[in-house]
Structure formats: structure tokens, C-alpha cells
Image: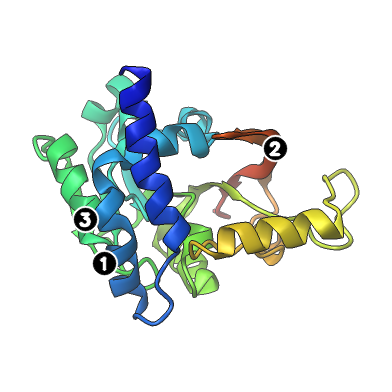
Amino acid sequence: MRPLERLRRDFSVLRQMSRGLPQHLAHAQGLQAFYAPQAEHYDDFRDRLLPGREALIARLPLTAGSRVVELGGGTGRNLDFYGERLRDLAAVDVVDLCPALLERAQARLGHRHNVRLIEADATTYRPEFPVDVVYLSYALTMIPNWRGALMNAIAMLKPGGMLGIVDFYVAPKRPESGTLGHSRLECAFWRRWFGHDGVRLDPEHLLTLEQQFPQNTTIESRAKVPYLPLLRVPYYLFLGRKAS
């Protein structure tokens, strides 16, 4: 893509993001109003904004015959990271509440016999059968009832199944030993910054995940932000296995 064309597309996305997620609408209507105008260029910009997605997918046990659910799957971009593993999976459900993003997913994945695109709420959707893997990629922070979504994800997992999450976060005021801490100013900045677009950085997210999954792998890191070269946004990658 030519630099000027990318700049033009980025500007259209940034302009919509600057308007923020409408607060006067119900959650589903707000998502549609926010994402529909930027859906065409959503993936290109988010590929540079949302780190760790490919790393998360690489660590998921996507073995032949597995059943997988992605909650908040949006445009289905993450399935591109599956590679050849995708064709051998029994079923992949991409669940999202925003029709505009699912339309993009339909254009990308509609020909896949083992992929279903489902417009539904992450707090209530249940697959027909228990599944081997559930994951959320920059979705938990977008769900107002995130605890409900998390408990629902756990409930749909088979015993021994895996939950994977990658998302932005802020650390609790007194982080556990061995984990990263963020200053009060940094926490306030990122919560306000992302909150404008309906992204809720709650320090309870990572604590709750680690409580629910004593057997886990947690990686904390930072990443660049497009057009803001001096900033590094904190994010985490979490993998937890449900007790057998």
C-alpha cells in the first residue's frame, strides 16, 4: 500500500475514533455506530495497534479435530494466523455483536466449511458442544459485563480446555510479586485514553484470570502506538487451562 493511501485510510479511522463510542446508545447499537464507518480499514490499522495476537494464536492448542470459539472476533482477522491448522479443526465459531465487523468477516471467511460467523453477546452465547479452546483478542476490555463473559467462556470449555486472552491493561495498585507495576499517572492516562472509545482498562481483569486459572502462563509487555512514537502501551497475553 502506498504511504499516502495508508495515511488517508488511517485518518478516516482516527477521525472516527476521535468521536468515541456513543454513550447514549445501547451497547450493541453503540458498537455498530462506532465501527461501521471504519470497518473497511479496520484491519490494516488494528494490525499496528493491537500487538500479541499472532503470538497468542501460535500458543493455542489448535490440533486436528478441535472445537474453538473466539468471543469478540470482529472481522475474523485472527483466523489468518491459524495457517494450515484452520482446515483441520472441527469447528470455529467467531462470535461478535457488531454486524459491520461480521460483514467483513463474511467476505474473508465465508467459504470455510468449518467456520461459523455468529452475531451474539459474549456473555450469553453457548456453542452446541463443549469446546477445546476459547479466546478473546482485545475484546474483554470492550465488554461492559466482562465477568459475565469470562464466566461464560469458562463454562463452555471442556475440562482441560484452554482459555487465551490478549488485551491492554493497567496493573493493580499493589501488583503481585514478579509482575509489572504502572504508576498512578500512567494508569489514569491509559484508562482515560481508551475509555473514550469504550475500552475499559480494569486492573481486576488479570487478577481475576489468575484466580480462575491457577495453572496459567502470563506474559506482560509493552508496544508502540501508531503515530505516537514516544508512548508504549501495556498489554498482556494470558493462557489458562481449565481443571480436568
> Which comes sooner in the sequence, label 2 or label 3?
3
Q: Residue at x 51, y 65 (%)?
A: 150
The answer to whether any part of residue 150 appears in the image is: yes
Please tell me whether residue 96 is drawn above or below residue 78 in the rendered image: below
Counting residues from the start of the chain, the first of labels 3 and 1 encountered is 3
Q: Compare residues 162 and 150 and report the one nearer the observer.
A: 150
Q: Secondary structure at mark 2?
A: strand
Relative placement, left or right, of 134 versus 232 is left
CA gap, disc 3 to disc 1?
13 Å
Binning the other alpha carbons within 10 Å of mark 2 as few (below 14), some (14 to 19) or many (20 upward) gives few
Q: Nearer the viewer, residue 122 or 184?
A: 184
Q: Residue furthest top?
A: 2
The crowding category of the residue bearing disc 3, from other C-alpha atoms within 10 Å (few below 14, some 14 to 19, many at least 20), is many
Left-right relation of 111 to 244: left
Q: Which residue is mark 2?
A: 232
The CA span between labels 2 and 3 is: 30 Å
In the structure shown, which secondary structural element does the residue marked by tag 1 occupy? loop
Report if residue 206 is visible in the image: no
* Residue type at the position of mark 3: Ala
Residue at point 31%, 72% (across, down): 28
Whichever of callouts 2 and 1 sits on the residue coming sooner in the sequence is 1
Disc 3 on helix, strand or loop?
helix
For label 3, the residue is: 100
